[in-house]
Amino acid sequence: MIELYLRKINKLKLSPIFELYAIKLTIMRYEEFLFRFNKQVFDLEYCRQLDLAISICKKLFFDYDEFTKKYQWGNSDILLDAIAICEQARLYPVNNSLVEQFLMKVDAITPDMDDYGDMLGSHALNACCAVYETLQFLLDQDSKRIYNIGISYTDNVDFKIQEHEEMTELQIDQNPLMIDARNYLINQSK
């Protein structure tokens, strides 16, 4: 895992000392990540919180779309429309009744893990949860929802890197995909 990250750094032609320093800075233990992300999310202003939530929803959307194609269940268009409503809230006042309608629609297309308990079902569930939480955020502006959305994103990354083999927490922390996901969330919530 760490070797892939080293190769990535080597392409930048950095000094060995800087490489070690960069690795130390970017590998964040799970508990440290949770603490930092939680603190930063609560310190963000509303518009930045909404931007972060929408960007995560867009990242997770493709997992949901893959799920709907495989199982011929769900509705990617509803999820996209819900994300579009969230984007409109950046420019226009929130239409509470429309948001409440889409909360019900997103809930209806969210896979039940009893029916779709595989990894793809988990990815789709996280995508729906992120969109649902973003819609709820439009109504209550509760920062905890943004934190939950970020955790949905890292959970999906966790599922993907452990899809073929079980890993220790340290191996997950050192995986380049997890490093990138956590750094993205930390950087976007500064």
Image (spheres, helix red, strand yellow):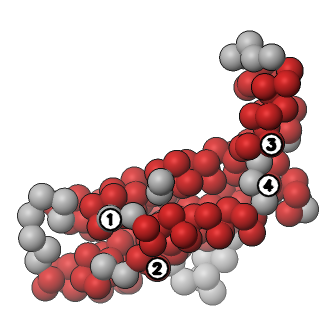
Q: Nearer the viewer, mark 1 or mark 2?
A: 1
The residue that mark 3 highlights is 24
Distance CA(mark 4)–CA(mark 2): 23 Å
Q: Nearer the viewer, mark 3 or mark 2?
A: 3
Q: Quadrant of residue 93?
A: bottom left
Depth check, front residue: 17 or 140: 17
Image position, residue 29 (x, y; %)? 78, 60
Mark earlier in primary sequence (1, 2): 1
- Is any atom of residue 129 visible in this view? no
Disc 4 crowd rating (10 Å Cα; few below 14, some 14-19, many 20+) is many
The residue that mark 1 highlights is 45
Tags 1 and 4 touching, CB below 8 Å: no
Figure check: 24 above or below 185:
above
Q: Name the residue type under label 4.
A: Asp
Tags 3 and 4 touching, CB below 8 Å: no
Question: Does residue 41 appear to the left or right of 6 in the view shown?
Answer: left
Q: Name the residue type under label 1.
A: Glu
| Residue 173: numbered disc | 4
Depth check, front residue: 109 or 53: 53
Q: Quadrant of residue 6?
A: top right
Which residue is pictured at 79% across the width and 55% down the height? Answer: 173
